Image: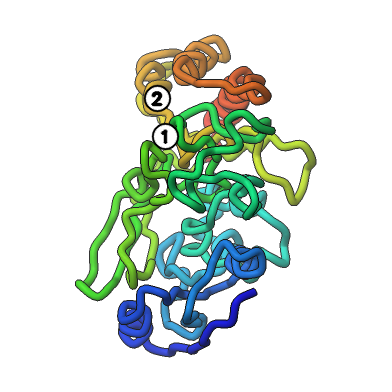
Amino acid sequence: MRPFAYTRATDVDAAIAEVARDPGSEYLAGGTTQVDMLRIGVARPRRVVDINDLPIAAVEEPPGGGLARMSDVAAHPAVRERYPMVAEALEKGASPQLRNMATMGGNLMQRVRCAYFRDGDRACNKRAPGSGCAAIPGVNRDHAVLGTSDHCIATHPSDAAVALTALDAVVRLRGPAGERSVAFDDFFLLPGDTPDREHPVGHGELITGIDLPDLPMARTSHYLKVRDRESYEFALTSCAAALRMDGDAVAEARIGLGGVATKPWRARRAEDILIGAPATAEAFARAAAAEMADAVPRSMNGFKIALAERTMVRALTTVASRIAGGAA
């Protein structure tokens, strides 16, 4: 690990000014991923500004401030009642110890879990732009089939972000130029020709909060995660789903996918197909197949296409059952 300077901030504006004045500075919150990046030499800041004392950790309106801990958000009564998919996604991420430390803002900003990104001796366009992508011809079982490019096929690792993208969350930022809000779907960038740029966040900008709309249909929502083992494992596929019914027909659908794309994936094609359709497994399967029609499998991850389709069907079926059972 390279040496770096350390500063602890207690004021939001002071923290922003401290980071903004030096391109080699970065924020430190829970540190559950960042410390790993420092140890393996992927992150090489000259200065780290500790922001854990900043007053942006409260869960006032779900899911709360940028420094709200994942475990606190998952346990909050309003989150569990109004947005169960968010609580379920948070509880399926990492381990209890990590969730007690990890922040909501840090969860959104975490780097990919691609082994080639973390191996300094292998080609990775995220770590070293222009060096190539060793995953494309390599071991790519866990990699993306949606939103990929010739430069990167790494999946986004967050569970919570999958639920938040389905709910049209908004990320609040504050930086040297003031405050602004970014729609959740615009907060994560596809790799394209610039896989090293994952967010539209400027240097010195800080996530101060995450807002969710008041969405009654979210009260019967569900997050389903499929993985190689039941705990402390990243998703092979996952689905956050919510439905609004008009009689026996689907009036509105919200679907987010994880484990299969280079960003938290909003399944808008499936959502559109479901409008007016009955809430049946057959209709869900047609919508899921349409969503995955443009998937690009690699040598080892083609199984994810069928698995993602089945994950969507199962998640939507669970939601339909909750609605029929009067869970709202």
Name the amino acid, label 1: Arg
Depth check: 51 or 49 in front?
49
The one nearer the camera, 69 or 116, is 116
Gap in angstroms between the C-alphas marked 1 and 2: 9 Å
Residue bearing mark 2: 271
Q: Residues within 10 Å of mark 1 (few under 14, many from 20)?
A: many
Horizontal relation, residue 234 to residue 28: left or right: right
Task: Give the residue type at disc 2.
Answer: Glu
The answer to whether residue 204 is visible is yes
Residue extending furthest right? 229
Residue in the image at 65% along x and 21% along y: 299
- Residue at left offset 78%, top offset 43%: 230
Height in image: 300 above or below 41?
Answer: above
Image depth: mark 1 or mark 2 in front: 1
Q: Neighbour class for label 2 at 10 Å: few (<14), some, many (≥20)?
A: many
User: Does residue 124 sit above or below 63 in this rendering?
Assistant: above
User: Mark 1 = which residue?
Assistant: 266
Above or below for 96 versus 305: below
Residue 83: % across, % down = 49, 49
